[in-house]
Image (spheres, coloured by chain):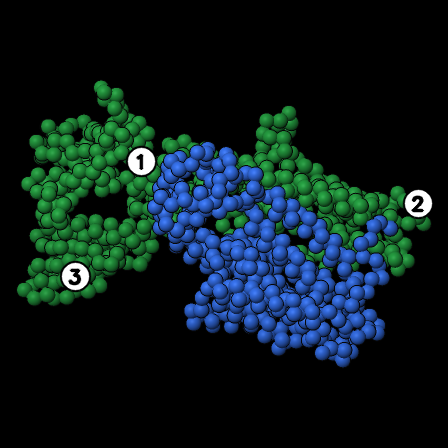
């Protein structure tokens, strides 16, 4: 046998700690929501809010205060400079939140101002301008992406987790009908995505698709916590954040699918023990896989955060948070929920399974 | 699904061989000793890695519609006049309709026949309102069909003009395409002088020749008292330090001629070695220019480009031969770019920059370097971990990871997909997640071994029982990637592409190729010996 991190007979009682897990998740979410409300909503980056970002590189380190002072005369009152990327590279990001300036004029103004005010070689490495119209479009697209992700994933997991594709068809039909009606009222995309989510949860509950319900809840938990932590870290909400969130959705579901598959397999045994035992045993059986996969993923994502450079940093950071939260939730949150609501009754063994539930 | 070992090995070798062939040009560069044997395709780098500029331009469709309506109003007035019908004050209302007065209500039928005959497709009579004294106010609306046609035509025309301009500007591999919502995306890889490019692309280049209104009082006009039928404009004069001075001038509104008949435009130099732009008209343009100049000898004619007056020389005599020149104290580059835009034709409507992203080549290089460093560091850690943890099984995992990389590169190169910085991040992420499939299988095999199964049976159970879970677990990632591809923009799309190719590749290698390795491994073992996994 090769090396083992988790001994084969490990039997950690995860479920007895589920209250602590719930409290931790609750606190993070509350703090995050408080942060978001305190800011007056999510802080959007230029992708969504419009504006100009200019990345400048110098040949030596410049004090941010000094840089801001020098640029004060540029006639761009809301310009803010900040350090960017690895410290040895002397890179700075200048952010101009409003998108009404012509980008090429901003470029030459900044260049002139830096020529005049600073004794340092400088070059503009990157300039991005997003007009208000495009920002609005991108926001809409991001919402659509989230909406379709929720829609497709809901349909997929209600079929997949329950092995009942007929049921998934019912889900899909119900969802589409409900959303079509909501669209007729003219509900904006963001609310549609939220509505899709709520309808999914409601239908899973009503149709007693409990595995699917657990998976969706774990997914929402991961997304919400990731957004909360990013907000607490003062990060902007960008298009790449949405990409990271969608990736996290895939990752989180992946983990939940693997764990729930094992729960189902163990429940099919001739005389399965109490549900809490089954869940604990399944999580323990999958624990080394869960830790190895998260471990290798964390190895690469951390190297991306540290070495990948400024442009990709926030994206990598969102992934990092999502992977950690996703791993934790597939152990604690998805399992706890399943314990709370019981597994989906299977036709032959429904009495047995339900007896151990709730 | 039982596939014999022989077939498994053959198919695996085939796929990996193909991946190697298609990925080699990317690793070796275009100029390599095997050049003649390998496909001539390399992975295309996105603008964020190569450096360059991406512009999204919005075409002002309202302006295009209103221009077209205005033109039709003017034409209709002339056509009506030919049949002794007087219509006055044709004007555009709300970019959707044309309104004018017919002086003699008795001629309504005749006028409507003219409209019917000439503008059946374009206009429909929406409203006729009697204004007293025999006057009728007509409102003609642009038909939905024509509006759509005009939009398409305008966008196509704008696209064509931009293509021409950029081709002459000399950027290698430009990419110019239509996008939804009356937009045009222009991608210029490797471009450094972004300012010049933006001006070249953005310029409407609407050229007009207008008479100078010499009776008007310029000072009064500046204060807002412009005579009827005239307008205030500014003439640019270049100062010695390169900046521009604006001098007010009053022009007749109605242009004598526009730039649509330009056949060619070139930069020429006068005897003081100052550049100017020399124009030649096509035959029809030459005739119009001759007539116009003949009719206005000794008067000043202003040359107006995009509402800016470049010069206003006095017409000395009737000009034959269809040539004109635009002087205006240009710099060499300005004259050169002006010649390009005049030659390429004017844009059918103004455009504005909705989105701009430019990345300097140094940053692109830096991004590639950082991405590769992160990939190397993360990858090395994962490779080492796999061997430490799974022994020989780990070596197999490492080989599979290598194959995955080859397949990703080969597919990117083969299908001409673009690699972006988030795309590199996707590859890095895959190095971590791709192991999952193998981990699931290996952990299962270990479990079955612990239960006392023979190695061959344990391997079989491990692969069979895990395969379905692996496929299911990966479907969610692929769903997410597909959605990202659909709704993402440039760089993010690159992430979706590498993520989905890589996920498919990792499923194939972990479930199919890996099995071949295991079966070979078990076959070579002495019966009864244990499996070191």
CA–CA distance between discs 2 and 1?
A: 79 Å
With B304 as the anchor, is B419 left or right in this view?
right
Residue B307 in percent (x, y) is at: 22, 42
Q: Colour of chain A?
A: blue
- From where the camera sits, is residue A53 visible? no
Position of residue B149 measured from the top left corner of the image (x, y, whole percent): 33, 52
Task: Classify mark 1: helix, strand or loop.
Answer: helix
Q: Residue at x 62, y 77 (%)?
A: A206
Q: Is residue A10 above or below residue B433?
A: below
Above/below status of B97 relative to B241:
below
Q: Which chain is green?
A: B
* Pointer 3 residue: B138
Q: Which residue is mark 1?
A: B341
* Residue B71 appears anywhere in the view: yes
Mark 2 or 1, nearer chain start: 1
**Is the Cβ of the residue at disc 3 closer than 8 Å to that at disc 2?**
no
Q: Quadrant of the N terminus of chain B?
A: bottom right
The residue that disc 2 covers is B526
Give the distance between the C-alpha atoms of the residues marked 3 and 2, in whole angstroms: 99 Å
Secondary element under disc 3, as helix, strand or loop, is strand
Using the image, name the chain to which the residue with label 2 belongs: B
Compared to residue B463, the image places residue B271 above or below, namely above
* Residue sitting at x 58%, y 35%: B41
């Amino acid at each position: 046998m090769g090396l083992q991190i988790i001994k084969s007979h490990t039997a950690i009682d995860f479920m007895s700690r589920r209250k602590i897990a719930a409290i931790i998740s609750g606190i993070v979410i509350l703090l995050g929501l408080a942060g978001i409300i305190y800011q007056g909503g999510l802080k959007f980056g230029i992708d969504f809010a419009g504006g100009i970002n200019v990345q400048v590189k110098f040949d030596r380190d410049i004090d941010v205060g000094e840089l801001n002072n020098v640029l004060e005369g540029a006639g761009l009152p809301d310009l803010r400079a900040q350090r960017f990327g690895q410290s040895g590279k002397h890179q700075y990001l200048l952010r101009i939140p409003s998108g009404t300036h012509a980008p090429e004029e901003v470029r030459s103004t900044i260049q002139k101002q830096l020529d005049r005010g600073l004794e340092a070689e400088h070059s503009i490495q990157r300039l991005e301008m997003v007009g208000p119209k495009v920002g609005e479009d991108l926001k809409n697209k991001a919402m659509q992406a989230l909406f379709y992700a929720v829609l497709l994933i809901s349909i997929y997991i209600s079929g997949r987790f329950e092995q009942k594709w007929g049921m998934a068809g019912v889900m899909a039909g119900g969802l589409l009908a409900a959303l079509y009606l909501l669209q007729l009222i003219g509900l904006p995309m963001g609310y549609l995505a939220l509505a899709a989510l709520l309808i999914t949860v409601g239908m899973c509950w009503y149709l007693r698709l409990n595995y699917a319900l657990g998976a969706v809840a774990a997914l929402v938990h991961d997304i919400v916590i990731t957004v909360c932590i990013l907000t607490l870290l003062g990060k902007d909400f960008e298009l790449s954040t949405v990409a990271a969130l969608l990736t996290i959705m895939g990752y989180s579901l992946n983990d939940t699918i693997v764990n729930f598959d094992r729960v189902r397999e163990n429940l099919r045994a001739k005389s399965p023990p109490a549900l809490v035992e089954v869940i604990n045993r399944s999580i323990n059986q999958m624990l080394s896989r869960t830790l190895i996969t998260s471990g290798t993923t964390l190895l690469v994502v951390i190297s991306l955060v540290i070495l990948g450079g400024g442009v990709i940093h926030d994206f990598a950071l969102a992934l990092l948070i999502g992977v950690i939260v996703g791993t934790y939730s597939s152990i604690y949150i998805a399992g706890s929920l399943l314990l709370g609501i019981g597994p989906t009754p299977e036709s032959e063994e429904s009495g047995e399974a339900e007896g151990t539930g709730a | 699904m039982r596939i014999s070992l022989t077939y498994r090995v053959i198919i695996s070798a085939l796929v990996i061989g193909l991946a190697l062939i298609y990925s080699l040009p990317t690793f070796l560069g275009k100029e390599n000793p095997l050049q003649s044997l390998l496909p001539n395709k390399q992975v295309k780098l996105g603008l964020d890695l190569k450096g360059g500029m991406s512009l999204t331009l919005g075409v002002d469709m309202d302006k295009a519609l209103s221009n077209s309506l205005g033109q039709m109003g003017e034409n209709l007035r002339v056509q009506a006049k030919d049949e002794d019908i007087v219509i006055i004050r044709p004007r555009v209302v709300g970019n959707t309709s044309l309104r004018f007065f017919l002086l003699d209500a008795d001629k309504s039928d005749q006028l409507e026949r003219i409209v019917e005959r000439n503008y059946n497709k374009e206009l429909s009579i929406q409203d006729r309102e009697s204004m007293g004294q025999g006057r009728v106010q007509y409102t003609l609306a642009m038909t939905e069909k024509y509006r759509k046609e005009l939009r398409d035509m305008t966008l196509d025309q704008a696209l064509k003009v931009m293509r021409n301009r950029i081709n002459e500007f000399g950027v290698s591999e430009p990419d110019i395409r239509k996008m939804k919502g009356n937009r045009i995306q222009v991608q210029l890889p490797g471009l450094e002088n972004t300012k010049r490019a933006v001006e070249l692309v953005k310029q409407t280049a609407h050229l007009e020749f207008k008479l100078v209104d010499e009776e008007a009082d310029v000072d009064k006009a500046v204060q807002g008292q412009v005579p009827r039928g005239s307008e205030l404009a500014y003439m640019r004069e270049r100062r010695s330090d390169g900046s521009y001075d604006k001098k007010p001038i009053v022009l007749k509104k109605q242009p004598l001629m526009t730039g649509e008949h330009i056949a060619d435009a070139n930069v020429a130099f006068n005897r003081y070695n100052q550049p100017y732009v020399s124009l030649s008209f096509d035959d029809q343009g030459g005739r119009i220019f001759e007539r116009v100049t003949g009719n206005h000898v000794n008067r000043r004619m202003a040359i107006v480009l995009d509402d800016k007056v470049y010069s206003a020389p006095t017409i000395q005599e009737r000009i034959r031969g269809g040539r004109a020149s635009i002087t205006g104290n240009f710099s060499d580059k300005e004259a050169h770019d002006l010649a390009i835009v005049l030659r390429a034709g004017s844009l059918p409507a103004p455009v504005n920059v909705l989105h701009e992203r430019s990345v300097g080549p140094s940053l692109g290089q830096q991004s590639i370097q950082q991405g590769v460093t992160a990939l190397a560091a993360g990858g090395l850690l994962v490779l080492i971990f796999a061997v430490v943890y799974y022994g020989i099984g780990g070596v197999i995992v490492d080989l599979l990871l290598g194959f995955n990389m080859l397949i990703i590169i080969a597919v990117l190169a083969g299908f001409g997909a673009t690699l972006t910085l988030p795309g590199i991040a996707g590859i890095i992420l895959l190095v971590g997640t791709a192991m999952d499939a193998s981990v699931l299988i290996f952990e299962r095999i270990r479990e079955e071994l612990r239960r006392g199964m023979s190695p061959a049976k344990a391997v079989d159970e491990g692969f069979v029982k895990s395969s379905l879970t692996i496929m299911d677990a990966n479907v969610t990632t692929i769903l997410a990637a597909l959605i990202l591809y659909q709704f993402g923009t440039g760089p993010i799309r690159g992430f979706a592409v590498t993520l989905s190719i890589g996920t498919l590749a990792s499923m194939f290698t972990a479930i199919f190729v890996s099995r071949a390795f295991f079966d070979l491994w078990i076959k070579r073992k002495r019966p009864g010996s244990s499996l070191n996994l």
